[in-house]
Amino acid sequence: MHLVRFKAYGHENVIGEHKTTVEITTEDYLTIQGTCIVGVQANQKLSDLAPKIRELVTLETTKIVLVMEVEGIIEQVTGTGGQNLTYSDSVSMVARTSSYQCGRTLMINADKAASNLSREFVRLLEKNGVEMNCELHFIPER
């Protein structure tokens, strides 16, 4: 298993109502149109992940888990890798409930979208600057 820890932060425009995706961005702003974005100012980019991880995620059998914690509340999104995941984006990481893959896609076939996160968790992220501790787990099939 490979583990990556990073931080992102809340923003007053976090809505968390998107039905098919959850996104974390390195950008420091958020408009109300970004209904999937739950964290801004992330200090980790997909494009900066280690080559071994970038290789692992191209296997559909690799399990990918995003764990997010804010003020003691924990949410977890679990999905898989895909053969067209490139991790080329330097701004966004998107967990998708679909199988769509692009440079921004962190995982496909995710078990949750932003709308599935607890409302208590989302409300905490509506505070500018609230810290969200994140972990990415990359688990190859054995």
Image (spheres, rainbow, N blue to C red):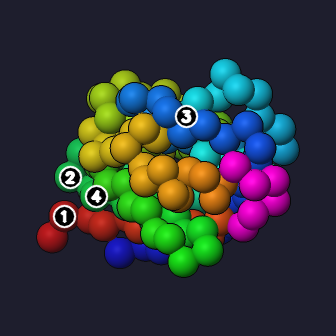
Residue shown at the point (77%, 44%) measured from the top left? 12
Q: How crowded is mark 2: few (under 14 residues within 10 Å), some or many (20 or more)?
A: some
Q: Is the magenta stretch mostly helix, strand or loop?
A: loop
- Asked which quadrant contains residue 28, the reply is top right
The secondary structure type at the circle numbered 3 is: loop
Determine crowd level at label 4: few under 14, some 14-19, many 20+ residues with C-alpha closer than 10 A.
Answer: many
- Residue denoted by label 1: 141
N-terminal label among 4 and 1: 4
Type of the residue with mark 4: Lys
In the image, residue 100 above or below residue 92: above
Upstream in the sequence, badge 2 or badge 1? Answer: 2
Left or right of residue 51, residue 132 in this image: right
Evaluate whether residue 51 shows in this view: no
- Gap between marks 4 and 1, in whole Å? 7 Å
Q: Verify CB contact (< 8 Å) between mark 2 and mark 1.
A: yes
Q: Which amino acid does the dot numbered 3 rest on?
A: Cys
**Residue of label 4:** 63
Q: What element does badge 4 sit on?
A: strand
Q: Name the residue under label 2.
A: 61
Please give the name of the residue rendered at 46% of the width and 69% of the height, measured from the top-left corner: 74
For the residues bearing labels 3 and 1, Cβ distance under 8 angstroms: no
Evaluate if marks 2 and 4 touch, with contact meaning CB atoms under 8 Å apart. Answer: yes
Q: Is residue 129 magenta?
A: yes
Would you identify the image quadrant in which residue 124 lies? Answer: bottom right
